[in-house]
Amino acid sequence: MQKQSNMPYAIEVQNIVKTFGPVIATNQVSFKVKKGEIHALLGENGAGKSTLMSILYGLYRPDSGILKIDGEVVSFKSPKEAAQKSIGMVHQNFQLVSTLTAFDNILMGLPESWWRGRNWRFKKVKEIESLAKEYGLSFEVERAVWQMSHGEKQRVEIFKALYRQSDIIILDEPTSVLTPQESDDLYRTLKKLKETGKTIVLTTHKLREVMHACDHISIMRKGKMVASMPSSETNERDLARKLMGEMPVEVRRIEKSESSTKPSKNLLELQEICAKGLHGEQALNDLSLFVYPGEIVGVAGVAGNGQKQLAEIITGMQNPTSGGIKFKGKWINHSSIKGMIDIGIAHVPEDRLHTGMAGSLDAVDNLLMKDYKKEKHSNLGIMKHSRNLDWAKSIINNYDVTTPSANYPVRLLSGGNQQKLLLAREIEGDPALLVANHPTQGLDVGATASVHNLLLDMRSRDRGVLLISEDLDEILKISDRILVIYQGMITGEFEPSKATREEIGLYMTGSKTQFNVGALA
Ligand SMILES: Nc1ncnc2c1ncn2[C@@H]1O[C@H](COP(=O)(O)OP(=O)(O)OP(=O)(O)O)[C@@H](O)[C@H]1O
Ligand SMILES: [Mg+2]
């Protein structure tokens, strides 16, 4: 082997193979990360990124291949052994215990977690608070994890790794659940950590942030490492080509013609809705909006401004404390999830594994979950198994979901493939209205374009879409109308062709507001 410079790599893997039954997740992968760099690992959904990261972290043992940390060959039997070599990981699906507080999660498993009295706890909380502040990671130390936003949970996970004095920090898709603002904060933190000599490896699908924030980029495709270069030697276009082996699919946006007449009746109308948040706070504040058939309405906003409650109210997961909901011209009182599904409202929730799917069930059962009683799928309570299997297989095929079989538990699918399956189920039900909360979260460039095309297809079939997203590019690309949500109110309404990112940004941060815009139905 060629002699390296004196400085060993922080991470060096050679010819790693990892299979799961029939799936070859990583196929002879070699990968090197220099000490003190921010290294991005890119790849389409199912390329093998999370698997490789989990091998570095000792969660999976490779079938064959060599792993070196700081030049020393290692063979981790567990994450504990990886932690002893100063490796910490922030997972794609968070690993925190949701019923415990951040404090308990951070100290879990450490000798210092043993109870040493109230005074000790008070001091420890203060210590964690000030350390977290130093790293630029803000979260409520004494809050239960289930009450936290995605961004907050993630900050707890990162802090947890740092608290264990990790020198190498692995982050699996750290920004897919973050707002643009939170992503900027995260990269600022990562740069700070890099300056103190930490090595960072992260996976992501967001090419723009990679170009801005990372020193080196490696690319996997279908289980193989296909390229590795400093970010100064590439650009977004080049990356997209290397990622997919071809140019990404274009989004087929067709502008509505000026002459196309607006339908006379709106599909959904919310009138002065008020609702409470998780902590009893006023999450929606006299919010009014409407969606017409054949329209994609984008709701832009910084996370935590009522988006979650907005989606929950429309999909029957929560009832408003006051205000009215009208769907297809009829008032809905005391909605339930089932009631909303029955009248044609579908939902892509932001938390796909917990709210959207049953992880231990297979693709067939997850696809059938909402519609199993329909005649197409069952007869007098008896499932039409072979028909349902063929039906599920054709959906898997049409939506390009990578899975060894339709009978594979969905929790074992890659994050992006879980998301594709969920979207497939909701869109296949042909709802009149789809409430899509971050529908492309965790999807690769090609899959994102496919989802945008699916939403545009819904629009052309006169369905309504409420697209809730923090990704302004996404909102500007496919919405017919953009609303901005701020502190539980709609504070601005824009036509995408006339709006600029900067202007919308001012409304998202509350610097500007138009009045009564939502109530103009
Ligand atoms: N524990 C597991 N059991 C069985 N198959 C698995 C397991 N983990 C991963 N796989 C399979 O290995 C392949 C690679 O998955 P991996 O999660 O590494 O992809 P990824 O690049 O992280 O994708 P994404 O961007 O969608 O998160 C996929 O086909 C996945 O279904
Ligand atoms: Mg992954």
Image (tube, rainbow, N blue to C red):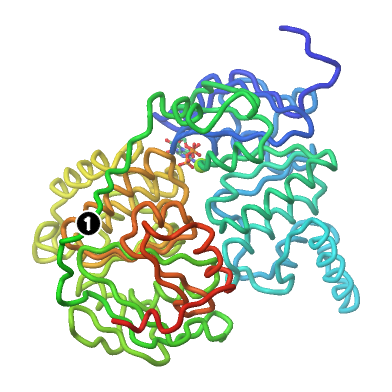
Residue 410 in percent (x, y) is at 39, 48
* Apparent side of residue 481 relative to residue 110 in the rendered image (left or right): left
- Residue at image position (51%, 41%) is 205
Residue 419 in percent (x, y) is at 39, 50
Q: Is residue 147 above or below residue 222?
A: below
Q: Is residue 120 above or below residue 452?
A: below
- Residue under label 1, please give it: 256
Q: Secondary structure at mark 1?
A: loop
Neighbourhood count class around disc 1 (C-alpha, 10 Å): few under 14, some 14–19, many 20 upward: few
Q: Quadrant of residue 153?
A: bottom right
- Residue at image position (43%, 45%) is 443
Amino acid type of the residue tagged 1 in the rendering = Lys
Give the quarter of the figure containing the C terminus: bottom left
Residue sitting nearer the eye, 514 or 266: 514
- Residue at image position (84%, 21%) is 7
- Residue at image position (47%, 82%) is 284
Residue sitting nearer the eye, 408 or 164: 164
Q: Is any atom of residue 264 visible in this view?
A: yes
